């Protein structure tokens, strides 16, 4: 499904950019060779990135006293 009409970026492409480490829509767009135009997709793009990041395994923390 198209996420960004201005740049013809799909949701899957954005998820791939998030998986390669982009924490924001702007950086994800940059990884995909684009930049935001109208900005109307950025809130939803951030939601998809945040959703992806929540699914990542959390690092195990050790408390050292
Ligand atoms: S719809 Fe993504 S920048 Fe316009």
Image (tube, helix red, strand yellow):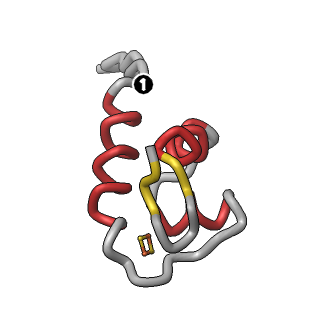
- Residue found at x 39% / y 36%: 53
Residue 62's image quarter? top left
Q: Is residue 45 left or right of residue 12?
A: left
Q: Nearer the viewer, residue 54 or 34?
A: 34
Q: Residue 19, relative to residue 3: is it above or below?
A: above
Q: Quadrant of the N terminus?
A: top left
Instruction: Determine which residue is flagged by label 1.
Output: 56
Where disc 1 sits, the SS reads: loop
Q: Is residue 58 left or right of residue 10?
A: left
Q: Residue 28, relative to residue 51: is it above or below?
A: below
Residue located farthest toward the right when viewing the structure as drawn: 33
Residue located farthest toward the bottom when viewing the structure as drawn: 38
Q: Quadrant of the C terminus?
A: top left
Question: Which quarter of the rendered image does ligand 1 occupy?
Answer: bottom left
- Residue found at x 35% / y 66%: 41
Q: Residue 41, relative to residue 57: is it above or below?
A: below
Give the image location of residue 31, x and y in percent: 68, 58
Q: How many marks?
A: 1
Give the image location of residue 36, x and y in percent: 50, 76
Give the image location of residue 18, x and y in percent: 52, 44
Q: Nearer the viewer, residue 33 or 62?
A: 33
- Mark 1 residue crowding within 10 angstroms, few (<14) / some (14–19) / many (20+): few
- Residue found at x 36% / y 24%: 55
Q: Is mark 1 within 8 Å of ligand 1?
A: no
Give the image location of residue 21, x and y in percent: 58, 45
């Amino acid at each position: 499904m198209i996420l960004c009409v201005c740049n013809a970026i799909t949701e899957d492409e954005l998820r791939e950019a998030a998986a390669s480490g982009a924490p924001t829509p702007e950086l994800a767009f940059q990884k995909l060779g684009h930049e935001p135009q109208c900005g109307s997709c950025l809130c939803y793009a951030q939601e998809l990135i945040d959703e992806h990041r929540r699914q990542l395994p959390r690092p195990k923390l050790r408390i050292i006293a």
